[in-house]
Image (cartoon, rainbow, N blue to C red):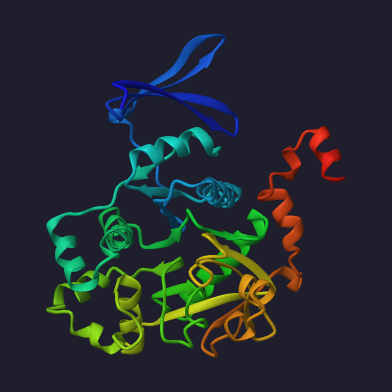
Amino acid sequence: MNIIEKIIVKVKKGKFRQIRVLGILVFEYYKENNKVVNLQISLFKKCHVDKSRPVFYLKINRNTDYTFLCLQHWVDVLSASNRDFFILCDNLQLEKAVLRKVIFPNSNIKFIRSCKNSRLKKYVKKIATKWWPNATFAHLTTFYHAKQNNIKEFWNIDADDTMFALEPEDIMSILQNVENYSKTNNIDAMSLDMWHSRTRQRHWSFGITYINNFSEIFNILDSLTNTDWQNNYKDCDVAFNLDWFFTYLKDEKKYKIESFYIENCYFIHWGNFLINAIGSSIYFWQNGYLNFVILKDIYKDNSLGMIPIADDCIRFSLENNNYVCFEKFANKYISNLKYFPPELKKLHNIK
């Protein structure tokens, strides 16, 4: 690690510079005509948080090409509607890479770390088994941080490997509908159907999750004395996390925890699609089925690639029920074909 680092951060209206000492942000400033203007001492900077609408926690931990694609798309979604957000990142090198590669709406960029105080460590011991402690700390941190900062409603987003194949405005329109539905029906937590239908209603999961004033989670965790709750699920998994604990709360009907999907919508859960064909995929909900595009169309396995949508999964529709063109979205936001020089386009017959 360099003792002193300068990071140039791009925002919609220009760019600003950060000066870090031993990784700690100390100064931020803009330059005009090669002169430093608007110098801020970041150690004492107070970041504005708009609590009038649900806040977003964008959790990241993977340093891959698709991390920056996904995070940029989520930042664009929130920028389109002026929603406030925190980026939860425990990797300093990844944090700095994000600042160099992602274009933000303004300089109000707020990074936080996973909280690992004695209280949360006690909870994690009763929830997480091998492979999952760090993820459980990160999920619980969103609840803990929200409570400490009097944030009543928030979204908990795995922002380094998830992407709706929709324009930012359309994504926010759907998410607002989810918020409104949850409030009207007193739902405590509502998550995208990433595993619920896939597992025939046996597993509820985080990923894209709206939390509606659910600070009671800490009272529940304080009353938890052992890991006996895991016995309900040992016939279908070998490692447990906060997702499984929320599955338990849902199954026991202690709180109202639901799943939702978007009809005629493509969604990407990034990863190695060919090797990790269940853990990562391209999803498509249509006509009562959740289609896993890779398994269905590449592996030609309908038993795994075409799953009935769970009957308790709440359906949302795109505006005017428009069909999403995945190819158009992929060429605009994902593919690097548009960056090919004319010679390579000619070589590969790209028009």
Question: Is 349 located above or below residue 258 in the figure?
Answer: above
Name the residue at 29% across, 65% down: 132
Q: Is residue 147 left or right of residue 327?
A: left
Where residue 191 appears, as percent x and y from the top left, is 47, 72
Displayed quadrant of residue 340:
top right
Q: Residue at x 30, y 27 (%)?
A: 1
Residue extending farthest top: 34
Please indicate whether residue 19 sits to the left or right of residue 336 in the image: left
Q: Position of residue 176 (x, y in %)?
A: 56, 65
Quadrant of the frame with the C terminus: top right
In the image, what residue occupies the spot 67% across and 78% down? 300
Tally of numbered tags: 0
Residue, x 33% and y 36% (percent of image)? Answer: 46
**Where residue 51 sits in the image (x, y, percent)?**
41, 53
Give how far across and how far down residue 40 sits, in percent.
37, 23
Residue 262 image-quadrant placement: bottom right
Work out whether 138 lies above or below 226: above
Question: Along the line of sight, which residue is nearer the eye, 158 or 191?
Answer: 158
Asked whether 161 or 119 is in front, the reply is 161
The one of 115 and 107 positioned closer to us in this rendering: 115
**Observer-nearest of 148 and 26:** 26
